[in-house]
Structures are given as structure tokens and as C-alpha cells.
Amino acid sequence: MNNSVYTINKGINKSIEFKGLKAQYIWYFAAGMLILMILFVLLYLMGFHSYFCLVFILVSGTILLVKVYGWSNTYGEHGMMKAIARRKMPKLIKNHSRITFQHLTITAHENQY
């Protein structure tokens, strides 16, 4: 009988991480780099000098890298989505009329508490 050696994957429920970028920030960085490549081609085809295009894309890429790493470190895996959702929540709900509450009825299910 042959004894088989199986390795166990211990990171099954962990989020993806690549060089410090966590979860969706990898996709944000990849999309930004793709946009910068397309922008480089467009600038070059429009007739801008190649050194200008190169410097512009390198500076923009550095800014993109710093921003995405900043978001990853500030918000963590799901923090940015939570912050965006928190901003969309209303701070206050105003109701100047009692009509909304006059037609409410209590059901039998709510009565047991």
C-alpha cells in the first residue's frame, strides 16, 4: 500500500491578499492600472511626446498605488463598503403628520411580547 501525503489548505475562508492589498482593493488597483495603460496609448496616439506620456503615467500610477494602499490600510477588508453604506443612511427622519401612525394595527403575532 502506498501512503499518500495530502496538504491541508488552512486559508479556506480567508480573503485574498497580494503584497498587502486585501480583497477588493486588488481589483481596484488592477482596474486603475488598466485605465492608465489605455490612457497612455490614447495620449501617445494623440501626438504627445513619449517622455511626457511616460512621466504622466508613472506619476498617476504612483498616486493610484498610494491611494489604494491607503484605502486598504484605513478601511480593511469590508470597511469601505460599510463606510459608504453608513453615509447613505439618513441622519434624521422627520414626520410632521400623525396620519401615518393613525392607521397602524397591532397583529396577534406582535401582541405576544
Image (spheres, rainbow, N blue to C red):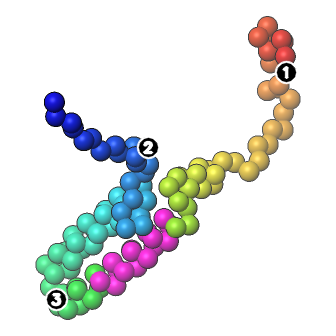
Category of crowding for the residue at label 1, using alpha-carbon neighbours closer than 10 angstroms: few (below 14), some (14–19), many (at least 20): few
Amino acid carrying mark 2 in the image: Asn
Residue denoted by label 3: 50
Side of 103 where 29 appears, left or right: left
Find residue 32 and report its image quarter.
bottom left
Location of the N terminus by quadrant is top left
Residue 50 in the image: above or below residue 93: below
Q: Position of residue 7 (x, y in %)?
A: 30, 44
For the point 42% across and 67% down, the residue is: 20
52 lies left or right of 13: left
In the image, which residues are magenta? 58-72
> Which residue is at 53% across, 60% downward?
76
Query: Which amino acid is tagged 1?
Result: Gln
Tell me the element at label 3: helix
Disc marking residue 102: 1
The residue identified by callout 2 is 13
On the image, which quarter does residue 8 sit in? Answer: top left
Residue at 22% x, 85% y: name it.
Answer: 53
Instruction: Verify whether residue 62 appears in magenta.
Output: yes
Mark before the other along the chain sequence, 3 or 2 = 2
